[in-house]
Amino acid sequence: MKVLRSRTVKDKAWKYYCYPKIEGNENFANSQNMLNKLKARCNTLKISGSHTGEKKL
């Protein structure tokens, strides 16, 4: 995981949205394992994109 950010949920005390930035491809086995662990702990999990961190020239 590269970064973890959180934002409060409007009108809900002590509720937060968390935004982890993770380097990898969601189709790799280790990424699937991590996503499954997150799904087990999160009420909602949305994937906004996937990248490998490779620089394109």
Image: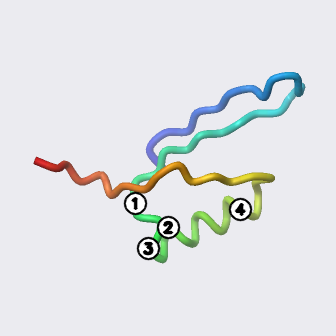
Q: Residues within 10 Å of mark 1 (few under 14, many from 20)?
A: some
The alpha-carbon separation of the residues under discs 4 and 2 comes to 12 Å
Find out whether the residues at labels 3 and 1 contact each other: C-beta distance under 8 Å.
Answer: yes
Find out whether the residues at labels 3 and 4 contact each other: C-beta distance under 8 Å.
Answer: no
The secondary structure type at the circle numbered 3 is loop
Q: Amino acid at mark 1?
A: Gly
The alpha-carbon separation of the residues under discs 3 and 1 comes to 8 Å
Q: Is residue 57 above or below residue 27?
A: above
Q: Which residue is mark 4?
A: 39
Q: Quadrant of residue 27?
A: bottom left
Q: Which residue is mark 2?
A: 31
Q: Which residue is mark 1?
A: 24
Does label 1 or label 4 sit earlier along the sequence? 1
The alpha-carbon separation of the residues under discs 1 and 4 comes to 17 Å
Does label 3 or label 4 sit earlier along the sequence? 3
Q: Is residue 12 above or below residue 3?
A: above
Residue 57 picture location, percent across and down: 10, 47
The secondary structure type at the circle numbered 4 is helix
Q: Amino acid at mark 4?
A: Lys
Q: Residue at x 68, y 28 (%)?
A: 7
Q: Residue at x 81, y 23 (%)?
A: 10
Q: Which residue is mark 3?
A: 28
